[in-house]
Structures are given as C-alpha cells and as structure tokens.
Image (cartoon, grey):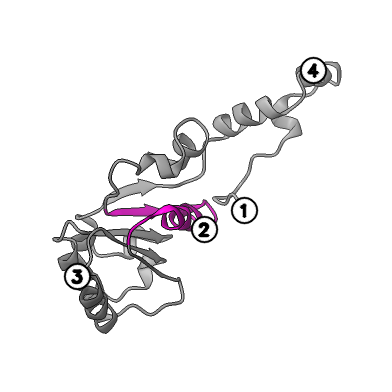
Amino acid sequence: MDLSEIFYNGPRIEELFSEKLQNTVLFSNPGTGKTTACLKILENYDGPKMFFAADTKFGKDQALELSSVMEYSDNFLVVFDEGVNMTAESQNTLRSLTNNENYIFLICTNEIGKMSNILLDRFIKLDCNIPKNESIMNMMKDWLPDNLNEILKEENLSFEEVFDFRFNGSMR
C-alpha cells in the first residue's frame, strides 16, 4: 500500500489504524510524510506513548530501559523516527519486545534495506513512496477552476505541460 491510497483516495492515516494499531514500519524516500503521519497518530493516541527522534541514539541500554518502562503499561505506543539509526543489538532487543501484544511500535525509515530482517519480519511494512503522477493530477484537477480544460485547449497546452510533476521522491 502506498500513501497515495491513504492521503488521496482512501481513509486518513489515523483511520487506517483506528481499529487496532499494529507494529508497522513506514518506509520511503525523505519528505513523503512518514514522520508526520506517525506524529499525527501519536498525537491522537490515548494510551501511554513515547517518541524517539531521528537524532536519538537507540542502543541496547535504551532498549532495555524502554522495556522496563513499558513493563507495567498496556497498549504502550513507541514511535521511532529513522529506525535505521538503531544498532543491530537494539534491533534484536526491540524484536523480543514485539512478543508482547501490549507494546505497539511504529518505525519510520528512509533505508529499510539497512534494518534487520529479523526485526522487520515482526512488522507490517507500509511503502510510503510518493503518489503516482496520475493520482496527483486527478487530485489537482478537482482544486482547479472548472474552465481550466477550456483555457488549456485555447492555449493549445496539456495539463502535464503546465504542471511539472517531477518530485524526485519528495512531497516537501
């Protein structure tokens, strides 16, 4: 599933997880909304929660400390921005924490290939690459004046010629 289905043609990201949050890795190029989506989920989450920013070093000690904090909590949500910054040892510790259904992990990463497959096997993988040009064009057409097609026809231009859709992997 890509985020175009969530943001443009389907339910909002919060609705995707409204029934039951599950361990999920959101991955893609920078600027596609992974962290923003996770922060929105975190903001609306009613239970205990924790956020690890991209520049946070998350090693074995932090993983063990996290497990001790989470030990007495139900439905504890933890969001990791740039999960690729986790050490291999901390990824293994995190994997063992996924055995407990009371813990929910969301991980954002630009480089899913650098993360441990042993950890990733325990997560739903959500591809957040940018929407296809066709989806963006269809969405924009709804926002533009009704007579745009007439104007473009009079000027002998196509929609694609007027709007440049080379995003290079970023929606920023």
Residue 72 circle label: 3
Q: Residue 147 carries which label?
A: 4
Specify the amino acid type for callout 1: Arg
Q: Which amino acid does label 4 sit on?
A: Asn
| Residue mark closest to the camera, 4 vs 2 | 4
Q: Distance between the residues labelled 3 and 2?
A: 35 Å
Q: Which of marks 3 and 4 is in front?
A: 3
Residue 83 pos. (x, y %):
36, 66
User: Label 4: how many residues lie within 10 Å, few (<14), some (14-19) or many (20+)?
Assistant: few
Question: Which residue corresponds to mark 2?
Answer: 30
Closer to the chain start, of discs 4 and 2, is 2
Q: In which quarter of the image is residue 110?
A: bottom left
Say which element carries label 2: loop
Left or right, residue 16 beside residue 153:
left
Residue 171 is one of the magenta-drawn residues: no
Numbered label attached to residue 6? none
Q: What stretch is highlighted in magenta?
A: 23-47
**Spatial distance from mark 1 to mark 3, Cα to Cα?**
39 Å
Q: Distance between the residues labelled 2 and 1?
A: 9 Å
Label 4, label 2: how far apart the Cα atoms are: 35 Å
